[in-house]
Amino acid sequence: MTARPTVLLCDDSRALRMLAASQLEESGFQVAGEARNGLEASELYATLKPDLVLLDLVMPECDGRRALAAILQADPDARVVILSSLGAQNDIEECLKMGARSYLQKPIDPEAMERVLRDALA
């Protein structure tokens, strides 16, 4: 049996983390950890070394853009998928230029999430 891909889930909304974690588990992924802000995300990435990071853009203390930069500086091969609300197209484009693999719009569609994350692993 092949190990399930691990995901670090980072969003300041506890409700979104709970929903996304459930959807990830149903899609065959394993949630390696959860972070409430970008600082926690970069620290947990270094500790957990997940296969993927699902990273919100707008968070307190350290936003997704800064967390993305820190994660990619520590591991240039990190697979990060940005999670954002509508209206953040410029921020998404900047993150893709920085090295994010893809992005997902909120609210999260389970089929789209699975497809985007599997593509990011390929």
Image (cartoon, rainbow, N blue to C red):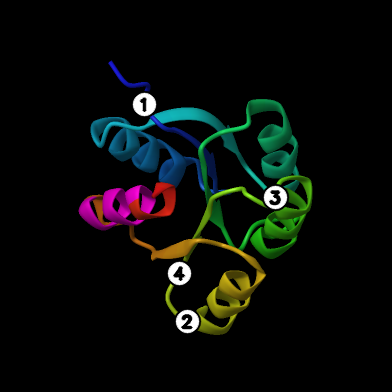
Q: CA distance from mark 2 to mark 4?
A: 6 Å
Please say if 3 is above or below 11: above
Left or right of 86: which side holds 79? right
| Residue 29, x across and y down, in percent | 35, 32
Which mark sits nearer the N-terminus, 2 or 1? 1
Q: Nearer the viewer, residue 28 or 75?
A: 75
Write down the residue under mark 3: 38
- Dot in front, 1 or 3: 1
Q: CA distance from mark 1 to mark 3?
A: 24 Å
Q: CA distance from mark 2 to mark 3?
A: 20 Å
- Dot in front, 2 or 1: 1
Please say if 23 is above or below 100: above
Write down the residue under mark 2: 87
Please say if 4 is above or below 51: above
Q: CA distance from mark 4 to mark 3?
A: 16 Å
Which mark sits nearer the N-terminus, 2 or 3? 3
| Residue 85, x across and y down, in percent | 45, 69
Q: Residue at x 50, y 61 (%)?
A: 101
Write down the residue under mark 1: 4
In the image, which disc is placed on residue 85? Answer: 4
Which mark sits nearer the N-terminus, 4 or 3? 3
